[in-house]
Image (spheres, rainbow, N blue to C red):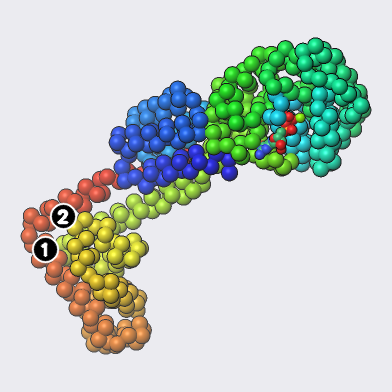
Amino acid sequence: MVLEGLGENLRHTLKKIANASNIDEKLVKEVIRDIQRALLQADVNVKLAIQLTREIEKRALTEKPPAGTSSREHVVKIVYEELVKILGKPKEMKLRGQTIMMVGLYGQGKTTTCGKLAKYYQKKGLKVGLIAADVHRPAAYEQLKTLAGQTHALFYGEPTAWKGQEADEANSQIAGRVAAKIVERGIKELKPKVDVIIVDTAGRDKLEEGLIDEMKHVFEIAKPDEKFLVMDAQVGQQAGPQAQAFHDAVQVTGVIITKLDGTAKGGGALSAVSVTKAPVVFIGVGEKVDDLEKFEPARFISRLLGMGDIQTLLEKAQELVEDEDEAEETAKKIMSGRFSLVEMRQQMDMLNNMGPLSKVLDMIPGMGSVRSRMQDKEMEATQLRLKKFRVIMDSMTQYEMENPENIKSSRIKRISRGAGVDPKEVKELLKYYETSKKTMKGLTANKKAQRALMKRLKMDGASLPPGMGGDGA
Ligand code: GDP
Ligand code: MG
């Protein structure tokens, strides 16, 4: 996965949002700080990172979620949308016959990417031809020829043309003309046989007059539909000015950022290029011919953020809210002391769903002391007892669950047989029920305690955002 570090940090932040009980200013500010830090670590420009997070903050605090969307979902969506925005708009790539010319500095991955593109278009059903027009490096000819073999693309090159062509200013004119001649002959030979022609060219250590001259010579002959600038992600934020300079010199139609697999700082290159007039069209994510991905900001960010997982998380949070609505009803009944086994069972199930009893007690304020007083053995015994109670209740009819006071000896016998327990244990359950009821009644007879409990219940209920659901981001 490309930009794994950034993805991990952002996913962590989104989970914070998805799990939050309440979206308030404090949480938004915390989220903003997290995102800013994550972006800066990925080498995204400071100004851009601040601008982006400011926008997220503004929207998160002022926008009302559309009907059917929870505030959690809405904030996640805002973060996603704003991140997509900084990567710019996707460029539409037509799948049809065309000529593509590669440009870029030395060692950026031009030749490798020619092979990757050949594979890409061949897979889409277009026949591809590769032309070797790097007249400075003899190795480039062999390299491209090998790649053509690997990808079943046709190949045109002239190995004899390389002799002594140093890439200096003086012979750039000559080199340009030699390269242009090769391209001319290559196109003549390949054009009738293929749909897509990809021209590999020479680079320089930096963007200089000689390189521009050479490229211009080749352009005039190749008349490429696309001019792809190939850049190593390692250049970071410098990718921006570089892409702009190349664009100004030779009207680049698309940028390919390579070696994104090898750097945590790829965020710098990607975001910097997006503000230039040359859009990122592909990314290179490895040395093999398959390691090329069409660059689509929305998909890229969605994958980076693990939106599928986040969506699941949001849905889980939704279920929790629904459960809590039901739980509130149950809790009210139980507190009033007017409950049957139905409510008691619900309460037990809920407790059970929350995990081991010891963990649950840790989560409840004030229960820590109970937890410390209870030995692990006792805890286990309690857990077992509750489990047995559930088994017993499973053997009861709805009528019995709703009217436990009417469970007399013949029913007790039947239930115990069904549950595979001793009748004593059924009685024990009924006793437990009676005791709980009395305890609750005693507690609620104390009006002050009751009010305090109700208040606590309301507070918990009110902190949950209403109306989760909808399709989200
Ligand atoms: P050129 O001088 O621009 O033609 O660059 P090359 O295509 O010869 O590539 C230079 C080096 O970068 C080679 O060792 C490639 O294997 C490597 N390379 C190119 N693209 C990628 C990429 O996306 N990921 C990784 N890890 N290496 C790459
Ligand atoms: Mg090369």
Disc 2 crowd rating (10 Å Cα; few below 14, some 14-19, many 20+) is some
Res 443 label: 1
Nearer to me, 136 or 383: 136
Residue 355: x percent and y percent? 35, 63
Decide if residue 220 is in sight here.
no
Among the 4 quarters of the image, the one containing residue 392: bottom left
Among the 4 quarters of the image, the one containing residue 171: top right
- Mark 1 secondary-structure assignment: helix
Q: Quadrant of ligand 2?
A: top right
- Mark 2 secondary-structure assignment: helix
Give above or below for 197 relative to 406: above
Q: Which three-letter amino acid code belongs to the residue tagged 1? A: Leu
The answer as to whether callout 1 falls within 8 Å of ligand 1 is no
Which quadrant holds the N terminus?
A: top right
User: Which residue sits at x=82%, y=32%?
Assistant: 139
Residue assigned mark 2? 453
Residue 113: x percent and y percent? 73, 34
Drawn side of residue 436 relative to residue 30, left or right: left
Decide if residue 173 is in sight here.
yes
User: Which residue sits at x=56%, y=28%?
Assistant: 236
Residue 439: x percent and y percent? 13, 68
User: Which residue sits at x=37%, y=36%?
Assistant: 31
Q: Earlier in the sequence, mark 2 or mark 1?
A: 1
Q: Which three-letter amino acid code belongs to the residue tagged 2? A: Leu
User: Which residue sits at x=29%, y=87%?
Assistant: 422
Mark 1 and mark 2 in contact (Cβ < 8 Å)? yes
Drawn side of residue 324 relative to residue 451, left or right: right
For the image, the number of numbered tags is 2
Drawn side of residue 244 relative to residue 150, left or right: left
Give above or below for 26 relative to 253: below
